[in-house]
Image (cartoon, rainbow, N blue to C red):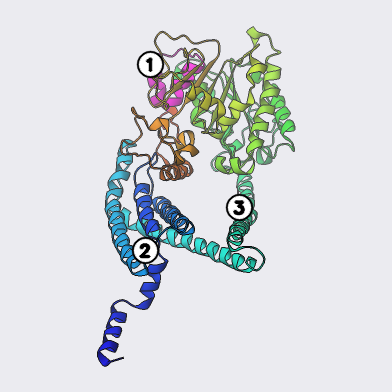
Amino acid sequence: MSAVARLQTRVRGFIWPGWATRILRTLSIPGLILASLFFAASLTPSLIPRTDDVQGILSGLSLAAGYGLGVFLHWLWSYLELPEFSDRTHNVLVLIASVGAALVVLLFLWQATEWQNSIRALMEQEPVDGGFPIRLGLIAAAVFAATLAVGRLFQLLVRFLARHLRRFVPRRLSNVIGVLVAAGVFWAVIDGVILEYGLRTADRSFQQFDVREYPGVEQPTATFRSGSPASLITWDQGLGRQGQRFIGQAPDAASIADFAGEAARDPIRVYVGLNAAETIEERARLALQEMLRVNAFDRSVLVLATPTGRGWVDNRAIQPVEYLHGGDVATVAVQYSYLPSWLSLMAESQYGHETAQAVFAEIYGYWKQLPPDARPDLYLYGLSLGALNSERAADLYDVIGDPFSGALWAGPPFRSETWRDIVRQRQPDSPAWLPRFRDSSVVRFTNQENHLEIPDADWGPMRIVYLQYASDPVTFFEPQALYRKPEWMQAPRGPDVSQDLTWYPVITMLQLAVDVTIGDAAPRGYGHVYATEHYIDAWNAVSNAGWSEEELGWLKRHLAD
């Protein structure tokens, strides 16, 4: 080789080193294109405002999903032995695709701030700052790199297995077996190690947290309070942290009387913690015995509240009905888990259902034996997973002969079969986020605005109200968003849903899945955080309290969050 040729080779190697060529050969053109498009779509708004770290994780996963899909399509093309580009052409096209992908990423990162602020404006939140796109971009790159490393590891395992299997079976069959075995190994690691260890660790952590006393709450001395010295349920072990919180937040007769300007009663609250008894049946019987001890059935209103996964009963939901009825209310709740609702669904989904059924059977069985004119009105209440389990507690055929008075279910999860059936059968001119069901005599829906007064529609003997926000991902998530546009995204949209929200295959489903995990981070009155004032309207209708709009306004201001 001449000196000139050697010099040219060195210059080319300096300008474009060999390792760069090797990298280009490994990159997938469809992967780069789809990765950039998936990343761009992930930045568009969904239901809940996202912080930079949450958005970065979502965008990183979207990058990985797009690149993975592109790699699969590229592999399928090669596997079908269709014509491919030469190495030189491939490298040039990869460069073009990389530049195009970078431009798309930068353009949509620049737009991301405006999109996030469009949701924040609807929910009256402070806008994000100018560093939002930079932070989320760095986090997305880290998540993508980690996901890509896992994908490479899976690919190496498949190749290793296939190479050793080729001595015994044909090449393509060895590839298929290698993929299946590698998938089995990865699933065993995820399910048997990561998930099992993670759930076990979470279980221990939340169990230890549940036995801690709730700060600022003291053991009651009044005999009608659960956890008092006269109670069948001990304060330190029988109630648990959430039970102490629920009992300690109850208003007294004096507070209610001061507001109402007339005599009131001390509301009764009964709570049975997870550690109060060994079995579901024993806890249900204990709840009934405690109710009998405090004469709960002598009240005019009885509320059977099903807690969320961690045992929480929202005080903002129970106080309104206590004020609306002058404290003449008894509320009972039985804990079935100390895990958050989404973990309860994964680890013990049937446990909440079984507990709700046992508690309802015990209390309803006693209630229906009482003379109809001498027993309280019986209402069911649940929020989130509590709403789902409360729905499942009462079988229509068991209560149709002697129905309870009504139910208030807030933020029903998308897995609720009853809720889905009602929405599916709604009147055609009503939107999915605010359905109107048949003649509205039994079931009605409401949100931030009171939609429970419907002209020319009379309530029947049983009143059921669903309180749901159009921006609640726990209610409106659906796996089918992977491949179809959800009905609630059709026009007209809910008042708290951004008009910039656009459906994209795969991406929208990922966005909504992330929204489910951060639904509680929304401001009060949006997402999965339900406000006292909206509970007040709902309880006034469900329990037929008969308060005027002016009176309800006074109560809303008094109990304002």
Q: Amino acid at mark 1?
A: Glu
Q: Visible in this render: residue 551?
A: yes
Which residue is located at x 38 percent, y 46 percent? 50
Q: Which residue is mark 2?
A: 85
Q: Relative to residue 406, is residue 533 drawn left or right?
A: left
Q: Is residue 258 visible?
A: no
Which residue corresponds to the image point at 56% horizontal and 19% vertical from the top-left? 265
* Residue 537 among those drawn in magenta: yes
Note whether 320 is above or below 442 in the view shown. below
Query: Which residue matches tag 1?
Result: 549
Q: Which mark is residue 195?
A: 3
**Which is more foreground, mark 1 or mark 2?**
2
Q: Nearer the viewer, residue 242 or 187?
A: 187
58 vs 373, nearest the viewer? 58
- Image quarter where the N terminus lies is bottom left
Quarter the C terminus occupies: top left
> In screen coordinates, is 512 left or right of 90?
right
Residues drawn in magenta: 533-557
Is residue 269 found inside the magenta-colored segment of the image? Answer: no
Label 2: how many residues lie within 10 Å, few (<14), some (14-19) or many (20+)?
few
